[in-house]
Image (cartoon, rainbow, N blue to C red):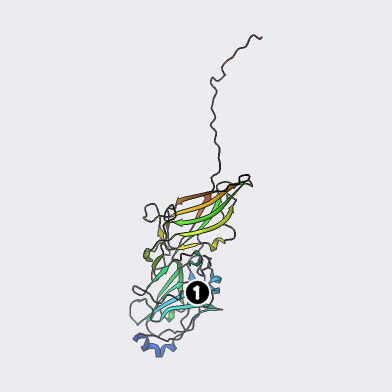
């Protein structure tokens, strides 16, 4: 289901040290020009998916590079600590710094340089969001909202690099997926022919059979300092999950004609994903999830169009960093069955003798 690959992001960023507020930074700023420019390098720890808002489109290295400079590819927080100090995430050096790609390097502004003493602890996330103005809770956590509009949903990636000095240059981020990705296919139970037309009308994911209640979390808080050496099942990655929302996944009219699973034409499969905060909908979980599908049936020679709405509970724990496909089978074909008496009684038949005629 997943493709593991490393995506080298050659990142160069010549930075000057400006606007540093702490005494430690001020005391070293006169010597900052002796250090080399801070630069970044990055990898995607597994196949990445969309960050640029086009209805869940897949992100690869080229797509990341092509994000407009005004939007930015990823954001960086960096906190300087004096020599001998323990790790301390924060934002006294980099505060949601926008990083973009400018051939052939990753760059950002204003420039900053390595300090001759101490270390810097970095946090990063993608895609960049200019509305994020600060971190919370020990300066490592960030609030996140899942858009109710599927076209605006984004695949959230996170990374960190602690205890960095000039010897570590360029700072290497290994990004991992923070959300769960959900896709779908649809098919008929059996092939249909020209005498019948079956059309998919809607797909809804909700918290009840009637679609009246929400299911998926609306908001949550991600801890960007969470260790990324185990990219899945990070129990401490998310907290403060709240709200419940449903998604009208498909709405329109599409003729379903095959018993082979497929994604509706006209909507690219990799541009129709849902990106949701990890959530448990398994058998014993308190939260419930239902898929509700409406389709129509019309036979040649019968003017009436019949509408059928069906639902099914999805009992699945959607885990961080994992992709899922919901395979929908619609249509109830008319089947026949026959019971045949295995023997005659009596076996040779009842004898009827005719020995005279009129």
Total labels: the figure holds 1
Q: Residue at x 33, y 77 (%)?
A: 86
Quadrant location of residue 119? bottom left
Residue that extends furthest to the bottom in the rendered view of this protein: 30
Which residue has dot 1 on it? 73
- The picture places residue 9, in percent across and down from the top left corner, at 51, 74
Q: Residue at x 44, y 75 (%)?
A: 131
Judge the density around disc 1: few (<14), some (14-19), many (≥20) Cα neighbours within 10 Å. Answer: many
Q: Is residue 131 above or below residue 146?
A: below
Q: Residue at x 54, y 30 (%)?
A: 340
- The picture places residue 54, in percent across and down from the top left corner, at 53, 67
Quadrant location of residue 220? bottom left
- The picture places residue 121, in percent across and down from the top left corner, at 39, 77
- Viewer-closest of 162 and 215: 215
Q: Is residue 192 left or right of residue 291?
A: right
- The picture places residue 270, in percent across and down from the top left corner, at 54, 62
Is residue 66 visible to us here?
yes
Residue that extends furthest to the right in the rendered view of this protein: 358
Q: Is residue 171 above or below residue 302?
A: below
Is residue 191 visible to us here?
no
Q: Is residue 253 left or right of residue 17?
A: right
- Viewer-closest of 249 and 319: 249
- Viewer-closest of 90 and 133: 133
Q: Is residue 281 above or below residue 189?
A: below
Q: Residue at x 40, y 60 (%)?
A: 279
Q: Secondary structure at mark 1?
A: loop
């Amino acid at each position: 289901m997943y493709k593991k690959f490393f995506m080298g992001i050659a990142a160069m960023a010549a930075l000057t040290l400006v606007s540093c507020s702490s005494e430690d930074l001020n005391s070293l700023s006169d010597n900052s020009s002796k250090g080399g420019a801070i630069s970044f390098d990055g990898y995607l720890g597994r196949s990445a998916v969309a960050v640029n808002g086009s209805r869940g489109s897949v992100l690869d290295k080229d797509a990341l590079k092509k994000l407009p400079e005004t939007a930015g590819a990823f954001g960086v927080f960096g906190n300087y600590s004096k020599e001998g100090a323990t790790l301390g995430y924060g934002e006294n050096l980099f505060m949601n710094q926008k990083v973009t790609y400018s051939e052939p390097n990753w760059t950002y502004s204003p420039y900053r340089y390595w300090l001759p003493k101490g270390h810097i602890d970095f946090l990063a996330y993608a895609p960049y969001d200019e509305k994020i103005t600060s971190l919370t809770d020990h300066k490592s956590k960030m609030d996140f909202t899942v858009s109710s509009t599927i076209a605006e949903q984004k695949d959230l990636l996170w990374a960190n690099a602690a205890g960095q000095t000039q010897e570590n240059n360029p700072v290497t981020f290994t990004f991992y997926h923070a959300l769960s990705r959900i896709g779908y296919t649809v098919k008929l139970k059996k092939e249909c022919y020209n005498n019948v037309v079956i059309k998919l009308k809607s797909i809804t994911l909700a918290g009840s059979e009637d679609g009246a209640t929400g299911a998926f979390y609306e908001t949550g808080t991600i801890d960007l300092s969470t260790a990324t050496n185990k990219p899945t099942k990070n129990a401490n990655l998310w907290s403060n999950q709240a709200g419940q929302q449903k998604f009208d996944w498909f709405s329109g009219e599409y003729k379903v004609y095959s018993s082979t699973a497929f994604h509706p034409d006209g909507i690219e499969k990799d541009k129709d994903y849902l990106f949701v905060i990890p959530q448990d909908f398994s058998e014993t979980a308190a939260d419930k999830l239902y898929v509700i599908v409406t389709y129509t049936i019309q036979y040649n020679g019968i003017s009436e169009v019949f509408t059928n709405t069906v639902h099914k509970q999805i009992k699945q724990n959607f885990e961080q960093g994992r992709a899922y496909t919901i395979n929908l089978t619609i249509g109830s074909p008319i089947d026949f069955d026959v019971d045949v008496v295995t023997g005659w009684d009596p076996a040779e038949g009842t004898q009827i003798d005719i020995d005279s005629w009129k």
